[in-house]
Image (cartoon, grey):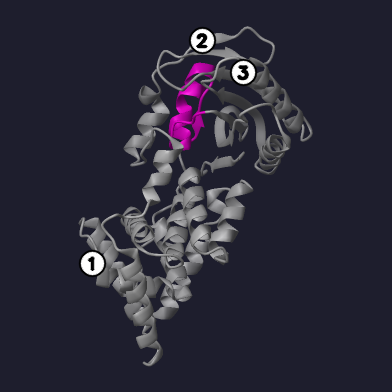
Amino acid sequence: MATMHPNPLPDAHRPVRISDPGDLIAAIPALLGFRPRRSLVAVCLGGGDPSVVRAVMRHDLPSGGIGPADRDGLDRIALVCARGEVDSVVAVVVDDRAGRRGVHNALADELGACLAEYEIPLIGAHALAEIAAAQRWRGLLGDSSRGVLPDPSSSEVAAAQVLGGRAIRDSREELEAVLDPDPARDRTRLAALIARSRDAGCAQAPPNRRVRLEFVLGRIADRASAVIPTDDEIVELALALADVRVRDALLSLAVTDEADAAEQLWIALARALPDPDRAEAAALLGFSAYVRGDGPMAGIAFTAALRANPDHRLASLLDDALQSGIRPESVCDLATTGREIAARIGARMPPRRPR
């Protein structure tokens, strides 16, 4: 199946400027967060500077020729570029299969035609077997440009991402595995405990939202100290996140210094909890990743949330925004709203980081 994997980079980050084709290709794993395989990657440039990277999008390569799904995917890339103030695009085809030169050229031509409808030029297109040191790349736009790739792990962009605490994984599958079920947790037992706690709660007075929110904040502080929550704590956390007001208040953590510790707790809960309860933690993880500019992780988290609960409104709205190329700073208002909700609940949230 063809997919688009967007990564709109946040304006608040230091601009990524790349002019040499080899350096641009080598930077792609750092920009995406993983090493793409059998992919067409669209590197979108703009912002008044033709060397500034504004966004990166990935499309699965077809197994055979170009089909309707591929054309739809390339159309979506062009539409996102048009909405995102993109001035020009460079395409990179990563494909380890022999005898595919014709397909690669056709993909570049098709993407160029889709972009041309919005008067956005495709200023470069390159192909190579894999993004690795010393790999040879070639041009696809009728030119004879060729080159040898520098070491992607030594690129300036990779160094900046690693120093910023963002891992660069070897594949998209490795990124998806971050949310694989935790083998140390019995999800069936947790589902029974959650159901029992909900039934017991129905016979009691409504829970205190401030107490629930402060309980979650306490477990986030534990996570910062590498303390693993117990099954009983996981049940209490699931009940707290199921309260929409508590969950929405927690959105505010994405723009605080507690964001990393919160993400670690959201990952732990998304791996431990059964469906549909894991959807809340996955949605919170997706929002936090989205705000910090990690589109691939955000997309994987939203997909996990929607698989756990197809009717999850927050995950659906945020996933639509991500797939449409809405920039991270445009969804940060949800964090402000979350802080306002927390204030009404009566809880004190960590201070917001300076923009």
Whichever of callouts 3 and 2 sits on the residue coming sooner in the sequence is 3
Within 10 Å of disc 2 (Cα), the crowding (few <14, some 14-19, many 20+) is some
Magenta part of the chain: 14-37
Q: Amino acid at mark 1?
A: Thr
Q: Where does label 2 land, which residue?
A: 147
Q: Quadrant of residue 242?
A: bottom left
Question: In the image, what residue occupies the spot 38% across and 78% down?
Answer: 195
Question: Element under label 2?
Answer: strand
Residue 116 pos. (x, y %): 77, 30
Question: Going 56% across and 57% down the picture, which residue do you hit?
Answer: 318
Q: Which residue is mark 3?
A: 100
Q: Residues within 10 Å of mark 1 (few under 14, many from 20)?
A: few
Closer to the eye: label 3 or 2: 3
Residue 202, compared with residue 78, is above or below; it is: below
The foreground one among 306 and 145 is 306
Which of the two labelled residues, at mark 1 and mark 2, occupies the earlier sequence position? 2
